[in-house]
Image (cartoon, rainbow, N blue to C red):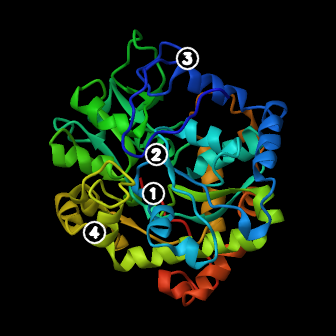
């Protein structure tokens, strides 16, 4: 690769909206599409593995620096708080300044190339990385629960109103795409992916991929009728008065994980103590954030010392320290009042039941590109193979046990989905 995929933390650069097809103004550049297509085969992924090995040379055990890659969304909170509060240092690790990316395509490429070694990634995208591109990496922990929403134009009052319109998702392999399509089917609507010049039927909803950082402006310009994405972009649209939340993702799939902590299997196998210390720092960051939400919002904001994100404190506080969730319940936006949820919360344990259900859900979801690998995935196998929960279990026990996160002592749960 001759050019860097990194985006300076001081700004979110806007890149040209050029699709591999003329299907949409999708936030993925032609270069992104080519890179992702290239990564879809083991033969091409092999050089990236070698590159990662080369970059790791000279580092033994805990000497390897923690190189975080993230998008400026609240899903990245544990990684960034762990860095901001020196939790990696307290675990005896050296952490580099986290590197911010503008799209999931870029963060995946940098991870596979070994330029970053600890990332938060969309849970369904981990299936694509490990089984589609055959890059050996594993989920070490969840980063959060809930934290996403479907936001629409002010004149959209119900899901059926999206018929004949365009809605943006952040990535085909995302819980957002999965849940949106579930909701559309329940309303008798069909998800399609049409070229910009193609007609959209009254019972169809055209889906496009858009970088999260571009969604609010696209909604304001009415090039899309809505988007489903991680916070704080839903809150930003509300504050700006250009959109309203139609449904929270956590009100569809209770306490779901949008993003997870993802590490290369090489690092886990060869440096287990390093992986443990990284995971412990992230778990401690989640516990601290639960008790210090306003402080966390300021640390992550553009008013914070490190300016991890371009978001103002009030936008992040609306998500992290929300006090208005009850108003959504009263208005009917939240349908399941008994679920007693927050707009976003933090719980690091990766339940096997969730991974199994996610595999089944993605297999029934329309995704673009070569997705033949999905058909061969066995949910129970994936729950064992994709996730390594040794480190997170030990980390949770070190901070007081599963009860401090509201998790059952046997680390199990039943999945609750209600469209």
Residue bearing mark 1: 75
How far apart are the alpha carbons under marks 1 and 2?
A: 13 Å
How far apart are the alpha carbons under marks 3 and 1?
A: 28 Å
Residues at discs 4 and 2 in contact (Cβ within 8 Å): no
Residue bearing mark 3: 20
Between circles 4 and 2, the one closer to the viewer is 4
| Precedes in sequence: disc 1 or disc 4 | 1
How far apart are the alpha carbons under marks 1 and 4?
A: 14 Å
How far apart are the alpha carbons under marks 3 and 2?
A: 22 Å
Of residues 150 and 292, the one nearer the viewer is 292
How far apart are the alpha carbons under marks 4 and 2?
A: 22 Å
Residue bearing mark 2: 176
What residue appears at the point 25 percent right and 47 percent down from the top-left corner?
236
Q: What secondary structure is found at the residue carrying circle 4?
A: loop
Badge 4: few (under 14), some or many (20 or more) residues near its Cα, within 10 Å? many
305 is higher (above) or lower (below) than 26: below
Residues at discs 3 and 4 in contact (Cβ within 8 Å): no
| Precedes in sequence: disc 3 or disc 1 | 3
The image quadrant of residue 25 is top left
69 is higher (above) or lower (below) than 132: below
Q: What secondary structure is found at the residue carrying circle 2?
A: helix
| Precedes in sequence: disc 1 or disc 2 | 1
Badge 3: few (under 14), some or many (20 or more) residues near its Cα, within 10 Å? some
Checking the image for residue 321, the label placed there is 4
What residue appears at the point 29 percent right and 58 percent down from the top-left corner?
316
44 is higher (above) or lower (below) than 115: above
**Number of numbered labels in the structure image:** 4
Q: Residue furthest top?
A: 197
| Precedes in sequence: disc 3 or disc 4 | 3
């Amino acid at each position: 690769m001759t050019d860097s995929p990194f985006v300076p933390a001081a700004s979110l650069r806007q890149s040209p909206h050029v699709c591999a097809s003329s299907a949409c103004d999708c936030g993925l550049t032609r270069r992104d599409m080519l890179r992702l297509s290239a990564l879809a085969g083991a033969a091409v992924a092999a050089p990236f593995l070698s590159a990662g090995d080369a970059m790791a040379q000279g580092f033994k055990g805990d000497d390897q620096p923690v190189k975080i890659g993230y998008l400026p969304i609240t899903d990245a909170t544990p990684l960034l708080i762990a860095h901001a509060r020196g939790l990696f240092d307290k675990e005896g690790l050296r952490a580099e300044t986290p590197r911010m990316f503008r799209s999931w395509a870029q963060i995946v490429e940098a991870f596979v190339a070994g330029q970053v070694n600890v990332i938060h990634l969309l849970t369904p995208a981990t299936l694509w990385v490990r089984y589609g591109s055959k890059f050996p990496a594993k989920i070490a922990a969840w980063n959060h629960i809930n934290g996403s929403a479907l936001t629409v134009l002010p004149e959209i009052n119900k899901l059926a109103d999206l018929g004949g319109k365009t809605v943006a998702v952040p990535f085909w392999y995302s819980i957002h795409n999965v849940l949106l399509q579930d909701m559309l089917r329940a309303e008798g609507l069909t998800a399609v992916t049409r070229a910009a010049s193609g007609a959209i039927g009254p019972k169809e909803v055209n889906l496009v991929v858009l970088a999260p950082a571009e969604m609010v402006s696209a909604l304001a310009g009415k090039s899309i009728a809505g988007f489903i994405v991680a916070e704080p972009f839903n809150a930003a649209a509300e504050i700006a008065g250009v959109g309203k939340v139609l449904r929270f993702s956590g009100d569809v799939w209770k306490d779901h994980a949008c993003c997870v902590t993802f590490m290369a299997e090489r690092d886990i196998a060869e440096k287990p103590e390093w992986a443990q210390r990284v995971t412990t720092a992230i778990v401690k960051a989640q516990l601290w954030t639960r008790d210090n939400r306003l402080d966390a919002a300021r640390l992550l904001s553009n008013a914070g010392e490190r300016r991890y994100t371009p978001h103002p404190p009030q936008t992040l506080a609306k998500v992290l320290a929300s006090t208005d969730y009850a108003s959504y319940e009263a208005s009917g936006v939240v349908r399941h009042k008994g679920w007693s949820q927050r707009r976003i919360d933090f719980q690091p344990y990766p339940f096997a039941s969730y991974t199994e259900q996610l595999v089944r859900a993605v297999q029934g979801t329309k995704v673009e590109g070569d997705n033949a690998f999905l058909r061969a995935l066995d949910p129970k196998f994936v729950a064992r193979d994709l996730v390594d929960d040794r480190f997170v279990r030990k980390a949770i026990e070190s901070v007081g046990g599963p009860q401090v996160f509201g998790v059952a002592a046997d680390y199990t749960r039943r999945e609750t989905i209600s469209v």
